[in-house]
Image: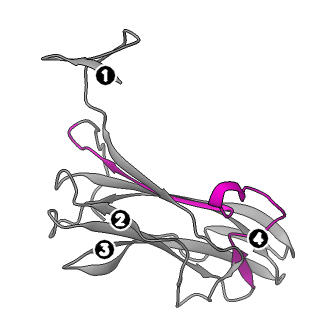
């Protein structure tokens, strides 16, 4: 805990000093509460995460770092893959598909009963038309039509202690005053 706030730094009780503001404004984490979520085939998607409410952005030019991890099983054999899409919501825009991987982001070639860990990472800007509104995020999943895939798999007691169900979702608001975007555009 800080012991003093000075004109150009923060002093902590262990003697360390902080001179710059962190580029990370806030982070929210969640886990889908159920295991063994079966996915629909390409052309439709299903909710795969809880809604993550980030509130109103601190700055209209900020970005959000959105990521997920999940354990999946190709329990139908055949060639198959799956992927996630990240959706952003504001009261005025509703749910919009901000970024997506498609159905081949994590794929296997006829490896029946094959477990793997899929993941994704996106940088999504504050909604340019509604920068002063509440922002929420969710992840939705789909699969390749030639197989049967379940995600957030119940594999014994793997990674399922304390409410975690073999999946994790997080969103972090990044302050553009303290983080440099080299070449990312809005889309």
Label whose residue precedes the other's in the sequence (4 or 2): 2
User: How far apart are the alpha carbons under marks 4 and 1?
Assistant: 51 Å
Question: Which residue lies most toward the right here?
Answer: 112
Crowdedness near tag 1: few (<14), some (14–19) or many (≥20) residues, C-alpha within 10 Å: few
Q: Which label lies toward us, 2 or 3?
A: 2
Give the labeled residue for mark 2: 53
Q: Quadrant of residue 109?
A: bottom right
Q: What is the secondary structure assignment of the residue under circle 1?
A: strand
Q: Which label lies toward us, 4 or 1?
A: 1
User: How far apart are the alpha carbons under marks 1 and 2?
Assistant: 28 Å
**Against 53, is 11 above or below?**
above
- Left or right: 106, with 140 as reference point: right
Label whose residue precedes the other's in the sequence (3 or 1): 1
Give the labeled residue for mark 4: 108
Question: Which residue lies most toward the top here?
Answer: 15
Rendered location of residue 121, percent (x, y):
49, 56
Quadrant showing the N terminus? top left
Give the labeled residue for mark 3: 89
Q: Which residue occupies 19% across, 53% down?
A: 61
- Left or right: 172, with 63 as reference point: right
Q: Which residue occupies 64% across, 84% down?
A: 39
Label whose residue precedes the other's in the sequence (3 or 4): 3
Q: Which mark is residue 2?
A: 1
User: How far apart are the alpha carbons under marks 2 and 3?
Assistant: 9 Å
Query: Which residues are the magenta region?
Result: 148-177
Crowdedness near tag 3: few (<14), some (14–19) or many (≥20) residues, C-alpha within 10 Å: many
Rendered location of residue 153, percent (x, y):
74, 70
């Amino acid at each position: 805990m800080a012991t003093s706030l000075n004109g150009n730094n923060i002093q902590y009780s262990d003697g360390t000093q902080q001179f710059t503001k962190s580029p990370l404004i806030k982070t929210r984490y969640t886990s889908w509460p159920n295991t063994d979520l079966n996915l629909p085939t390409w052309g439709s998607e299903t909710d795969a995460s809880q809604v993550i409410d980030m509130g109103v952005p601190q700055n209209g030019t900020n970005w959000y770092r959105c990521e997920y991890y999940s354990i999946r099983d190709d329990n139908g054999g055949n060639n198959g893959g799956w992927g996630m899409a990240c959706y952003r919501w504001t009261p005025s825009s509703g749910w919009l598909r901000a970024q997506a991987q498609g159905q081949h982001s994590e794929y296997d070639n006829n490896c029946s009963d094959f477990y793997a860990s899929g993941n994704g990472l996106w940088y999504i800007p504050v909604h340019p038309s509604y920068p002063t509104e509440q922002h929420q995020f969710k992840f939705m999943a789909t699969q390749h039509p030639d197989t049967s895939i379940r995600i957030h798999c119940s594999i014994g007691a793997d990674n399922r202690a304390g409410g975690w169900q073999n999946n994790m979702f997080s969103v972090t608001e990044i302050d553009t005053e303290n983080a440099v975007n080299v070449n990312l555009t809005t889309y």
